[in-house]
Image (cartoon, rainbow, N blue to C red):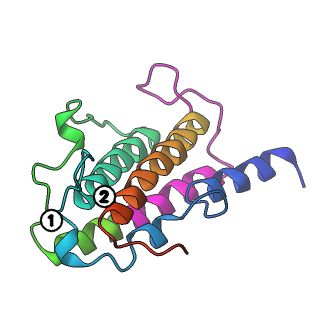
């Protein structure tokens, strides 16, 4: 196998890797609706806030990686939801679905050999698709860890 293809496969896997830590699906599965907007004592965020932050940041990184005429939200307020609780169960489900779709879209970008992993992204300041894929993986892993911590603090996590 050539190194380019191998790198692409490893990057695609890294986007939601469940080997070194929990994966996204496991982190959100089965969280009771009445706990999604609870901020545990001593922690800064609810599960909803973390979920939406992941979704918004992933959307921003994906749109930027596609090279679209994209304007990022203002930092930091534009990257966090306005409320600690989801407005509805449907909003939670839509956020989860959106994240899964965006992760798949990022995987498709990375796996497509027509996309140069090392070329600067148009309209950027030197960022590459490789850097953005690593950023998604790193950002998501960090906040998934926080989400698991929130669930543990709320008594809503079983070791998987």
Q: Name which residue lies at 65% across and 31% down.
A: 118
Q: Which residue is mark 2?
A: 51
| Residue placed most toward the observer, 115 or 9 | 9
**Left or right position of 14 against 90:** right
Q: Is residue 107 above or below residue 26?
A: above
| Residue placed most toward the observer, 73 or 88 | 88
Residue 123 figure quarter = top left
Q: Name which residue lies at 65% across and 59% down.
A: 13
- Residue 121 highlighted magenta (yes or no): yes
- Local crowd size for mark 1, using a 10 Å CA cut-off: few (<14), some (14–19), many (≥20): many
Count of numbered circles on the image: 2
Which badge, 2 or 1, comes first in the chain's sequence? 2
- Local crowd size for mark 2, using a 10 Å CA cut-off: few (<14), some (14–19), many (≥20): many
Q: Name which residue lies at 40% across and 38% down.
A: 64
| Residue placed most toward the observer, 82 or 155 | 155
Q: CA distance from mark 2 to mark 1?
A: 10 Å
| Residue placed most toward the observer, 24 or 12 | 24
Which labelled disc corresponds to residue 78? none
Q: Dot 1: what SS? A: loop
Where residue 126 appears, as percent x and y from the top left, is 52, 21
Q: Name which residue lies at 54% across and 47% down.
A: 137
Magenta segment range?
Answer: 99-128
Q: Is residue 120 above or below residue 90?
A: above
Q: Which residue is mark 1?
A: 86
**Left or right position of 73 against 82:** right
Where residue 66 appears, as percent x and y from the top left, is 45, 44
Question: Is mark 2 in CB contact (under 8 Å) with mark 1?
Answer: yes
């Amino acid at each position: 196998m050539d190194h380019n293809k191998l790198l692409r496969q490893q990057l695609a896997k890294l986007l939601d890797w469940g080997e070194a830590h929990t994966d996204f699906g496991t982190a959100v599965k089965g969280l009771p609706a009445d706990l999604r907007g609870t901020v545990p004592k001593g922690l800064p965020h609810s599960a909803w806030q973390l979920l939406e932050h992941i979704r918004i940041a992933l959307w921003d990184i994906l749109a930027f990686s596609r090279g679209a005429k994209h304007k990022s939200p203002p930092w930091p307020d534009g990257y966090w939801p306005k409320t600690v609780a989801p407005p509805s169960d449907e909003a939670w489900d839509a956020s989860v679905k959106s994240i899964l779709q965006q992760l798949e879209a990022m995987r498709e970008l990375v796996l497509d050999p027509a996309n140069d992993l090392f070329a600067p992204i148009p309209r950027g300041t030197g960022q590459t698709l490789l850097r953005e894929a690593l950023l998604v993986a790193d950002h998501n892993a960090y906040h998934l860890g926080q989400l698991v911590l929130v669930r543990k603090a709320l008594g809503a996590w079983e070791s998987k």
